[in-house]
Image: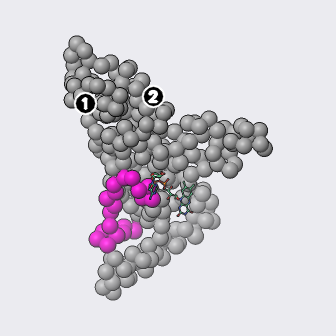
Amino acid sequence: MKVTLINYTPHPIETAFVAARTCYSADTPSNLWERSAADGEDKISPDRMHSLLDKVINSGHHSVLEHINFTFAIEGISRSCSHQLVRHRIASYSQQSQRYVKVASDAFVTPPTIAANPQAKKIFDDFIASVNRTYQKLLELGIPKEDARFVIPNAAKTNLVMTMNFRELYNVSQIRLCVRAQWEIRELFWKIKSELARHEELRGLADYLAPKCEILGYCPEHKSCGRYPTKEEVLGEK
Ligand SMILES: Cc1cc2nc3c(=O)[nH]c(=O)nc-3n(C[C@H](O)[C@H](O)[C@H](O)COP(=O)(O)OP(=O)(O)OC[C@H]3O[C@@H](n4cnc5c(N)ncnc54)[C@H](O)[C@@H]3O)c2cc1C
């Protein structure tokens, strides 16, 4: 799996700051923009911008975060993972088509539990070899790719481009960074977080991407992984 942040809103902190400040200021957004993005005597300090953003995030005034967009190139995840990903509706997706692109014979994800078990690995590899043979035979019989793909399993690799704003990224990360999330989508969101952290001006935003327990201070799941107590345990109801 490879995740690359290929584009994002320029001056992300300044953009969100101007959006937030506009709500509470008699000053115009264009003046606020001049003072936050441009260098000058009355430039608003980065600390002040980060501090307002922190207040906005902690208070739940999250519409402000929708002004920051990120576009990721996501490569080599399974169709099983992409199916979970695209359930998050507040984002834009462009995914490689199995109608137009032939599935490569080696483009399948092997789950770690299967890779670590020689007997399971043999069963899995034999199955993929049989899928490849069947898919190829159907194509040779003139069956179009859009129909031959019916034999392709969830393990098939896919590539996609995803644009998601920071509000949705903040929400989705809370669910998908949880150790109880399925391993592949969890890995995907850790890579997304690392991609943000790789860019100095985005590091502060990356810090907000965390599993829900870190934000709430308790585990909202039925059973905790052990990092945080459940809500019932906190309230002494268990
Ligand atoms: C552990 C886990 C197990 C799951 N198991 C299953 C399963 O077995 N079967 C299954 O079908 N799905 C399953 N899902 C997917 C899940 O039901 C959601 O479809 C998915 O997590 C998308 O999240 P979402 O709806 O919160 O938010 P998004 O689509 O990411 O939207 C973000 C937020 O916008 C708001 N929103 C978006 N659309 C609407 C709307 N139409 N109306 C009102 N508010 C809206 C909500 O507040 C929502 O939280 C699972 C998800 C997880 C994390």
Residue 31's place in the image compared with 128, above or below, is: above
- 184 or 116: nearer the viewer: 184
Q: Is residue 225 visible?
A: no
Instruction: Magenta stretch: give its range.
Output: 86-106
Question: In the figure, is residue 192 to the left or right of 229?
Answer: left
Q: Which residue is mark 2?
A: 55
Q: Which residue is mark 1?
A: 29
Residue 55's place in the image compared with 139, above or below, is: above
At a point 41% along the width and 62% down the height, the residue shown is 157
Question: In the figure, is residue 117 to the left or right of 59?
Answer: right
Task: Estimate the x, y position of residue 145 in percent, counting from the top left.
Answer: 33, 77
**What residue occupies the far front of the structure in this picture?**
26
Residue 108's place in the image compared with 16, above or below, is: below
Disc 2 is placed on an element classified as: helix
Q: Give neighbour class at mark 1: few <14, some 14-19, many 20+ (Cα, 10 Å).
A: some
At a point 69% along the width and 42% down the height, the residue shown is 230
Q: Amino acid at mark 1?
A: Pro
How many marks overall? 2
At a point 36% along the width and 48% down the height, the residue shown is 164
Residue 16's place in the image compared with 116, above or below, is: above
